[in-house]
Image: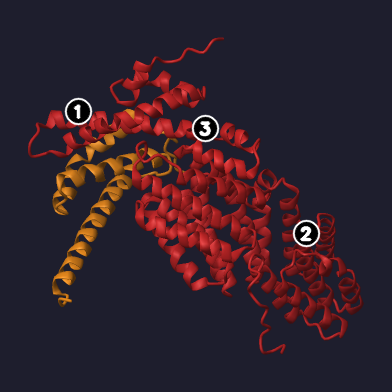
Chain colours: A orange, B red
Amino acid sequence: MRPRPSKRSEPGELQRLVLSVRHAINDLFAGYAIPEEKASTILRESVELLVRHCGQTDRPRQFFLQMLEDRCIAYVEAQEAAEEERDDGDDAPDA
Amino acid sequence: METTHPTLEELEQFIRGSLDDEAAAPIERHLEKDLCSRCLFATRKLMAEAEPDLRDNIRRFTRWDELPAAERRDGLGAAMRQAMRRGVVIRAERALGPELLAELERRSPTARRAVIRTAERYQLFGFVEFLCHASREAVFRDVARALELAGLAVEVADSLDPRIYVAKFTTDMQALAHAYLGNARRVASDLFGAEGAFQQALLLREQGTQGSPVYAEIGSLLGSLRIDQGRYLEARTILQEALALYRSFGFEREQGKILVKLADVEGYSGSPEKAVEILEEAVEQLQTAGAGRLLAYAHRNLTDWMVDADQALEALARYRKARELYDEHFQEPALGMRRRWLEGRIYAALGDLDLAVGAFEEVRGAAAERELSYEAAMVSLELAIVHLDRGEVAQVQDLVEEMTPIFRSHELHRHALAAVYLFRHAARSQTLTTGFAREILRYLRRARNNPYERFEPSARWS
């Protein structure tokens, strides 16, 4: 049986984890063209999710990056949906 | 010994993340271990005030084109400390759960809800988590309590203050509380009510943190409802989606739990061999995760489906291997009864019919004593099958005559009752076959929580 990660990570441990993936964070935000304001919200949510669930995962780094990427994708999809809706509105015949 | 409380200034530094880990540790202990509600509520007030700081710190980190690396790193460090401290507050809220629940339970059920809506003391994120967890723990022991706890969780989740918690997380909690309410209703056989609660949960889930652990947990609970509704195709899709999420998160225990449910989907759909395969994977997963009670359940289900898959010897070997686990985790009388039942099934499958009859009779007695009519009906069918195998038609006749209390009880839903009537009729008219009895038994097993599922005999018997 392989050893389980500790139930609760030390504060410094999580901080080091996030710092160690800072380049990946930058790449994600740049890759999905996330504006600065939204990037803060996404990062904030992901950090809190990491803090809450780090005891359940044996791969906290991957978990954190996945939370970030999921939120980036959700943002891009929401933007695209909003754009489509606007386009549909423009194409609609005048009443 | 008199408790020393941190000063308001220290609490403020704590929640703003300006205390280092060493200085923060005694405050963490005070909140989480000493359960000082006075300091907890003072910290929560400060949490709302410190919110702009957290946002600024995060923003500092994300301004990679403008700020030097060191300043960005400091921003992240402060934000992380703040997030960790918020985590401490939520855990402390959760730890306060038993005390808050005891206070609420001193009031009438209506007054409980009113007080939750008006008193800030109960409007805690961690309290919703606690109530959901408590409902899950209670659901198979005391479903009425599980319903009440989940109802309270919904009430608390609806009253969370958006200035203190992240809006999406609050929505997650609302969705989760509705899902637990749906889960409790499912176990109480109120499948329409369960469906309603889950529809609400799904609507809320769409507005919450999609693709998160809460998202997967709701999927896992919904999967159980779809199984009870006999909607196996949907159950499979929903559970596989949740499994994929848990795999990607690296949550081993939850993966094992989903596999246990997926095995039921396969078993009830008529593929016990596939159920066995899936449960073997689940057992491995749960062993790694060190999930004792769940592992015991997985072993028990595995043995059970092995019997159905005509793997009686393997079932016996598996049962012997898991004996210690059963002893450790199945000490409650109802679970002890199920263990004996399983032994009977293994003996019957091995052809050791005397031992099988002994075990089933014991279970029948225990079920009658505890007024568990559904279980009594099922084990009577098990017994009838063994007697039929031995050509003991008279014993089957005696057995059905002894089933009168089952027909008088209100525990069997009307479709289950109709199926048991058919069994009695066939036995009395000496047309009962083991095949037909097995079919009714399989139906009863499947329709335990589903009062809407009819017994439809296969063409062979009609």
Q: Which residue is mark 3?
A: B95
Quadrant where the C terminus of chain A is found in the figure = bottom left
Pointer 2: what residue?
B372
The vertical placement of B220 against A91, above or below, is: above
Question: Viewer-nearest of labels 1 and 3?
Answer: 3
Report the front residue among B181 and B223. B181
Label 1 and label 3: CA atoms lie apart by: 31 Å
| Number of on-image labels | 3
Q: Position of residue A8 (x, y in %)?
A: 42, 34
Crowding near pointer 1: few (<14 within 10 Å), some, many (20+)? some
Q: Residue at x 19, y 28 (%)?
A: B74
Same-chain status of marks 1 and 3: yes
Q: Residue at 58% x, 50% y: name it.
A: B294
Q: Helix, strand, or loop for circle 3? A: helix
Looking at the image, is B69 positioned above or below residue B199? above
Let me know if marks 1 and 2 both belong to one chain: yes
Q: Give x and y (percent) for residue B461.
A: 72, 88
| Image-based side of B45 in relation to B297, left or right | left
Dot 1 corresponds to which residue? B74
